[in-house]
Image (spheres, helix red, strand yellow):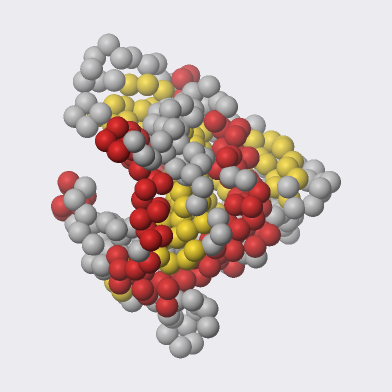
Amino acid sequence: MHKTATTLADGRELFYYDRTAGTVRDAVDERPLEPAASLSEIRLDPVLGEWVTVAAHRQQRTYRPPAGECPLCPSRDGRHSEIPAADYEVAVFENRFPSLAPDSAAHVAAHDDDPLRTLRPGNGRCEVVCFAPDHDASFADLDEPSARLVLDAWTDRTVELSALPDVRQVYCFENRGEEIGVTLAHPHGQIYAFPFVPSRTARMINRAEAHRASTGRNLFEDLLAAERATPERLVLQGEHWTAFVPFAARWPYEVHLYPNRRVRDLTALDEAERAEFPGLYLDLLRRFDRLFPAPDGAAPNRTPYISAWHQAPKDGGDELALHLELFTIRRAPGKLKYLAGVESGLDAFVTDVSPEAAAERLRAAAPH
């Protein structure tokens, strides 16, 4: 991997990732941009003990532009985008409309004196990861070397963002499809560097520590061993990775992908694990796209999904295991899984597809 660091016209950082050493990336951002303003703050919910980010400036962010005005395409034919180069392999840059930003302290003064009104600056960082220059592509369209380059970029950003003083957890993810709420159609993901440990991670830590206290073993190692021993929910197995539908899946089609060796984050993967990941992950994404075939003559189906890396926070969480969770809100052709009152109101999920049936369908969705 070859990395080139540069800056955009308003001072935000941009990084190019290339497979070939010595690739020159010297294009200059010629746009007349004013410095981006962030009004991020985090507020503690006194009832649930969870942090909520308030980022009112994001109301002005770019919303579903036509393909010819996409800000994630390369800069070509006199049109300037967020990526000054006329071509690229993988590009990562600071979000112009971030939920969290390093300069939030300039706008928000922390105060913790009132336990019902705990407020702090939203000091973190949000980055955009462009997987490919082709506007009409998808992650599933990448070849294995390109997918490996994205993995290397995720890992590099995890290292650098974890080193920031206010950051406590780094979260890499992709939203795909208008049904998910994606506002830019270009193939891309995001990285959030949080100044707090999100509640889902905190709950996983608590469960893992309780499992260790009661059994003397690691929760995630026991979980993976149990799934590998009972293949009804297995989807894919490699030498270094295993993909399965969880026993209590929340979403109609949900797959968790674990390295067979427990590691705490992306930086701890070894070369053999990194080499095997692209093939298995691309296989999973393509199976998702084959779940709901497009009608004859229609454009190829692209199942809406969220793909999310769960890794341990910077400090603590030693019982956690790095894993990727991939799920779709589509439950049947033309039908979406909307969160109902019990789910949105109480976090009490009701799934429409049994995990075992979902795994069987995903196994059957192998290429012919």
Q: Is residue 323 visible?
A: yes
Above or below, 322 against 121 in this view is below
Instruction: Return the x and y of residue 242 as percentages of the image width and height.
Output: 47, 58
Q: Along the line of sight, which residue is nearer the eye, 336 or 307?
A: 307
Residue 179 figure quarter:
bottom left
* Left or right: where 318 falls relative to 20: left
* Left or right: where 213 falls relative to 140: left
Q: Along the line of sight, which residue is nearer the eye, 114 or 163?
A: 163
Q: Residue at x 41, y 60 (%)?
A: 228
Which residue is the extreme one toward the bottom? 296
Residue 7 figure quarter:
top right
Above or below, 166 against 76 in this view is above
Q: Is residue 73 visible?
A: no
Q: Residue at x 21, y 47 (%)?
A: 347
Instruction: Return the x and y of residue 14 as percentages of the image width and height.
Output: 66, 40
Q: Residue at x 47, y 52 (%)?
A: 258
Which residue is the extreme one toward the front? 216
* Left or right: where 234 falls relative to 145: left
Above or below, 76 against 99 in this view is below
Instruction: Return the x and y of residue 110 as percentages of the image width and height.
Output: 37, 16
Q: Residue at x 37, y 21 (%)?
A: 120
Instruction: Return the x and y of residue 136 as percentages of the image width and height.
Output: 58, 67
**In the rendered picture of this protein, how many numbered marks are placed on residues?**
0
Q: Along the line of sight, which residue is nearer the eye, 18 or 205?
A: 205
